């Protein structure tokens, strides 16, 4: 009798170990099952530390996205439940740090000595400008690649700031369905953004252009080229050079919505890292660039509308 609960616990750990292995092999349904099992208690844990219900929901989602990324990048043994609590704890600490930053103080440039103004870290940085434009362009295209329901969920949450209850009413979904939909939408957005930002999408489209130029027509290649070429001038030029004319439609509602979105959390992190790398490669200004990136990304602002 004494050993029964222990045996059941060991069996549960073994089952979760199998799910972790499946996630690492690319099985999204396996991670969905881990999410279903642990999301309620992780959400309670985060709410107790963050306080604000809406912010806690986003921190919980971000913690699970972080767990998915880590599982796919590592192969060590993981006791998923305590490991997930540790990730959630770190996510709440990050949230606290972001929310407790001091407000910026406006500086009167006219009243400042030229020598002092030159020491400020927030001056124009060519490296930062390049990073922002490339990142924003990738985000716009990644938004266009989402399914309609995922795109609407992202816009309602990130752009309009709707609560999960309000999103459910708009999309005719229950609370649990809203949570899983937003999780999948954010994961899809990150996957699309990574493929675009790394240049892999251009390589795939380049191969499609080659096949089309050789007369190997396929709907998949044509659709991939047409979608991508609307926003990628280099792939447009390449296609036309090889005698393939992309079908360029009008700018979609999705693209216009993406142009108004604040940067999602995962993109803000990468944005800071990319800007810091650009600074290190240029004038050693990585430490100075990070605050500037936070100003540009706007956390709650409409940074992309500036482009």
Image (tube, rainbow, N blue to C red):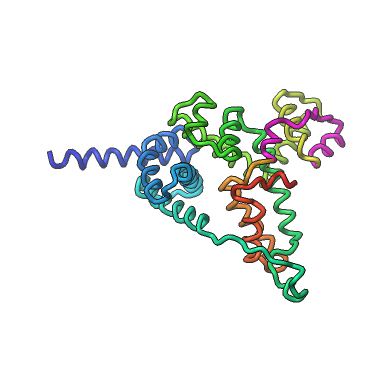
In the figure, is residue 289 to the left or right of 210?
left
- Compared across the picture, whether 107 is left or right of 149 comes to right
| Quadrant hosting residue 162 | top right
Q: Is residue 72 visible?
A: no
- Across and down, in percent, residue 294 comes to 62, 56
Check if residue 251 falls in the magenta segment: yes
Query: What residue is rendered at 59% in x and 39% in y?
Result: 189
Q: Is residue 132 visible?
A: yes
The residue closer to the viewer here, 296 or 51, is 51
Residue 190, picture quadrant = top right
Give the residue at x 52% y 35%: 182
Which span is picked out in magenta?
234-259
Give the image quarter of residue 259: top right
Q: Give left or right: position of 249 versus 153.
A: right
Residue 118, x across and y down, in percent: 74, 72
Q: Is residue 32 left or right of residue 240?
A: left
Q: Residue at x 47, y 49 (%)?
A: 74
Above or below 82: residue 231: above
User: Where residue 303 sits: x, y (%)?
Assistant: 67, 47
Where the N terminus falls, by quadrant?
Answer: top left
Q: Nearer the viewer, residue 15 or 187?
A: 187
Give 227 or 120, whichever is nearer the viewer: 120
Residue at 67% across / 41% down in the picture? 260
Up-down relation of residue 178 to residue 109 (above or below): above
Magenta segment: does it hold 257? Answer: yes
- Place of residue 238 in the rendered image (x, y in percent of width and height, measured from the top left): 82, 38
């Amino acid at each position: 009798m004494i050993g029964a609960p222990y045996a059941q616990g060991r069996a549960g750990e073994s089952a979760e170990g199998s799910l972790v292995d499946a996630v690492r092999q690319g099985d999204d349904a396996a991670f969905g099952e881990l999410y279903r099992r642990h999301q309620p208690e992780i959400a309670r844990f985060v709410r107790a530390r963050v306080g604000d219900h809406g912010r806690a929901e986003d921190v919980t989602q971000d913690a699970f996205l972080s767990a998915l990324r880590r599982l796919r990048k590592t192969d060590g043994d993981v006791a998923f439940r305590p490991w997930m609590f540790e990730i959630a704890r770190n996510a709440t600490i990050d949230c606290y740090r972001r929310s407790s930053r001091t407000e910026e103080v406006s500086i009167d440039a006219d009243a400042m000595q030229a020598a002092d103004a030159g020491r400020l870290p927030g001056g124009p940085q060519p490296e930062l400008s390049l990073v922002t434009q490339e990142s924003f362009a990738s985000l716009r295209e990644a938004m266009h690649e989402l399914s309609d329901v995922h795109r609407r969920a992202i816009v309602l949450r990130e752009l309009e700031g709707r609560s999960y209850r309000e999103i459910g009413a708009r999309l005719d979904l229950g609370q649990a369905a809203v949570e899983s939909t937003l999780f999948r939408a954010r994961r899809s957005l990150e996957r699309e953004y990574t493929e675009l930002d790394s240049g892999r999408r251009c390589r795939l489209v380049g191969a499609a252009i080659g096949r089309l130029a050789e007369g190997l027509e396929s709907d998949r290649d044509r659709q991939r080229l047409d979608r991508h070429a609307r926003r990628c001038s280099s792939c447009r030029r390449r296609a036309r050079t090889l005698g393939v004319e992309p079908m360029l439609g009008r700018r979609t509602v999705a693209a216009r919505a993406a142009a108004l979105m604040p940067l999602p959390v995962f993109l803000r992190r990468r944005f800071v890292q990319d800007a810091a790398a650009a600074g290190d490669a240029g004038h050693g200004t990585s430490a100075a660039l990070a605050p500037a990136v936070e100003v540009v990304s706007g956390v709650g602002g409409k940074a992309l509308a500036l482009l």
